[in-house]
Amino acid sequence: MSERTIYLDHAATTPLDPRVLDTMIPYLTTEYGNASSIYTLGRHAMQAIDRSREQVAEIIHCRPTEIAFVGCGSESDNLAIKGMAYASQKKGNHLITSAIEHHAVLHTCQYLERSGFKTTYLPVDEYGRVNPDDVARAITNQTVLVSIMYANNEIGTIEPVAEIGRICRARKIPFHVDAVQAGGAIPIDVAELNADLLSLSAHKFYGPKGMGILYVRQGMRILPQLQGGSQERGRRAGTENVAGIVGTATALRLAREELPQVTPRIKALRDRLIEGILTIPRSRLTGHPEDRLPNNASFCFEGVEGESILLNLDLLGIAASTGSACTSGSVDPSHVLIALGLPPEWSHGSLRLTLGKSNTGADVDAVLAALPDIVEKVRGLGL
Ligand code: PLP
């Protein structure tokens, strides 16, 4: 077992950046006021929240009033979809999404189906891309929301969300973008995307776990899903997690500032991984060859069990995933790989390597040195 973990699962989560922690500590210790209190300690907390909201708004190009801080990416997706669906019940009951969304979106749509909503699950092509024309064709006079992810968490494919947003805006259909995987990895501009609702999660960009953001375009009405106080302009009841909010804004700012330096380096490491791994017999890249997240290298190996690869990599101190963190541990291929149309002999053998700021060329070398033998060994074991 090597000393240091070679962490290649940044799509699952990222470590908290120490600079983010530094900005959070005062709000976990001395500045402990409740932001709703009118005395100085409370006002300090509210000022910190206001500053954080302004920072986030500036980065994603919207007004501070359009930002709601919530408890995680899943909550942001739930609030966007349920909040819009329930607020629009008089207009219609039809939702449109894709077959490869995260469960935070898919399970929310399925939940709404139990109370009378209908969902169209759009197919994707072999690279995991939604066709914007399919979105246009699926819209009916009952459609109240389209929800399409910016980038897929398993295969890294970037969806044509700006084009889908244009279609939705022209047809006056609210458009939600699950940007949880894109946040921190590529620039996010809600105006360019024509997004009406957009979800982010801080732990994907070196911020604290348990913190999400929901952008709600001015004029969009969503029904709150938590009843209680009027925090977050009535969109999310509950005493604000001031330290979490401050950390989220700092992490997003650092990610945006460092993107120009970090992206080319990570992309080069990703491309070396892809090139090296594709020399393994009966291997293929999953996701789009070009339009993919800069840190995502995902593969399938024929006649192999993905979990066996993970266990063997783990013995060498290499942390990877078969797909999304939520589907790890399940032996069935994920809904994403099934939607790509991969045959079962291939879809069982998936591997996702997602790079982050701390990875080096030596990490890539370690994977490239170990993986061919691992695949050969576990392939010999049969499926
Ligand atoms: N949406 C996508 C695309 C994700 O990848 C994830 C987490 O992996 C989520 C939503 C949920 O985010 P959270 O873990 O903050 O609830």
Image: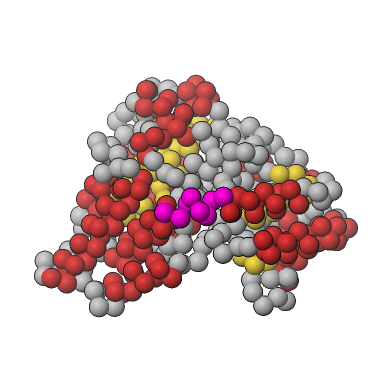
List x then y, in percent, for residue 32: 24, 74
User: Picture quarter containing residue 239?
Assistant: bottom left
List x then y, in percent, for residue 305: 77, 55
Judged left or right of residue 189, residue 32 is left
User: Which of 368 and 170 lies nearest the eye of the viewer?
Assistant: 368
Question: In what quadrant of the picture does the C terminus appear?
Answer: bottom right
Judged left or right of residue 112, residue 131 is right
Magenta-drawn stretch contains 259? yes
In the orientation shown, which residue stands out farthest toward the right?
Answer: 380
Q: Tell me if residue 144 comes above or below residue 300 in the rendering.
A: above
Magenta-drawn stretch contains 210? no
Residue 332 seen in render: no
List x then y, in percent, for residue 192: 39, 34
Judged left or right of residue 125, residue 89 is left
- Give the residue displayed 43% in from the left and 40% down from the top: 177
Q: Tell me if residue 205 comes above or below residue 78 in the rendering.
A: below
In the orientation shown, which residue stands out farthest toward the front?
Answer: 261
- Give the residue displayed 67% in from the left and 34% down from the top: 126
Magenta-highlighted residues: 257-264
- Give the residue displayed 51% in from the left and 62% down from the top: 14
List x then y, in percent, for residue 244: 35, 64
User: Which of 80 and 211 lies nearest the eye of the viewer?
Assistant: 211
Q: Main secondary structure of the magenta part?
A: helix
